[in-house]
Amino acid sequence: MTDDRTMIGVHTIDVDGTITLDDDVFEKSKLERTGNCLVVASPEGGVNVMPVTTGFNPKPSGQ
C-alpha cells in the first residue's frame, strides 16, 4: 500500500455482491453516497474503489 492511500476498516460483502461501506469511507475519500465509482479488480485478489465523474462509461482495457 502506498503512502497516499489509507486503509479504512473491513467491509461486508453480501451474498448478492453488495458491499456495505462504513461512514469513514465517505468521510476520508471523495466518494459520494449518490455518486458513481469504478471498481478495479486485481489478479492478486484485491479491489480498488475510485470516484468517477458523471457520464463516465468504463470499458475493460484488456490489460
Image: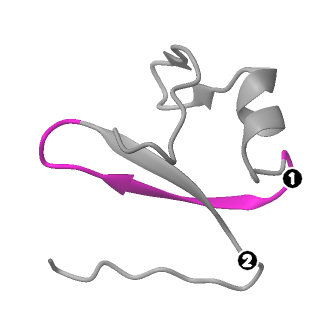
Front one among 28 and 61: 28
Residue located farthest toward the front when viewing the structure as drawn: 3
Residue at 17% x, 80% y: name it: 62
* Image: magenta residue range: 33-45
Q: Quadrant of the N terminus?
A: top left
Q: Mark 2 or mark 1, which is nearer the start of the sequence?
A: 1
Residue 52 screen position, x and y as percent: 66, 70
Q: Amino acid at mark 1?
A: Thr
State the residue position of label 1.
Answer: 34
SS class, disc 1: loop
SS class, disc 2: loop
Left or right: residue 11 versus residue 48 is right
Residue 29 screen position, x and y as percent: 72, 45
Residue 6 screen position, x and y as percent: 54, 33
Left or right: residue 5 versus residue 8 is left
**Circles 1 and 2 in contact, beta carbons < 8 Å:** no
Task: From this view, report whether residue 61 is shown above or below residue 8.
Answer: below
Determine the CA span between mark 1 and mark 2: 12 Å
Task: From this view, report whether residue 51 is shown above or below residue 33.
Answer: below
State the residue position of label 2.
Answer: 53
Q: Amino acid at mark 2?
A: Thr
Residue 55 screen position, x and y as percent: 72, 85
Query: Crowding at label 1, few (<14), some or many (≥20) Cα neighbours within 10 Å?
Result: few
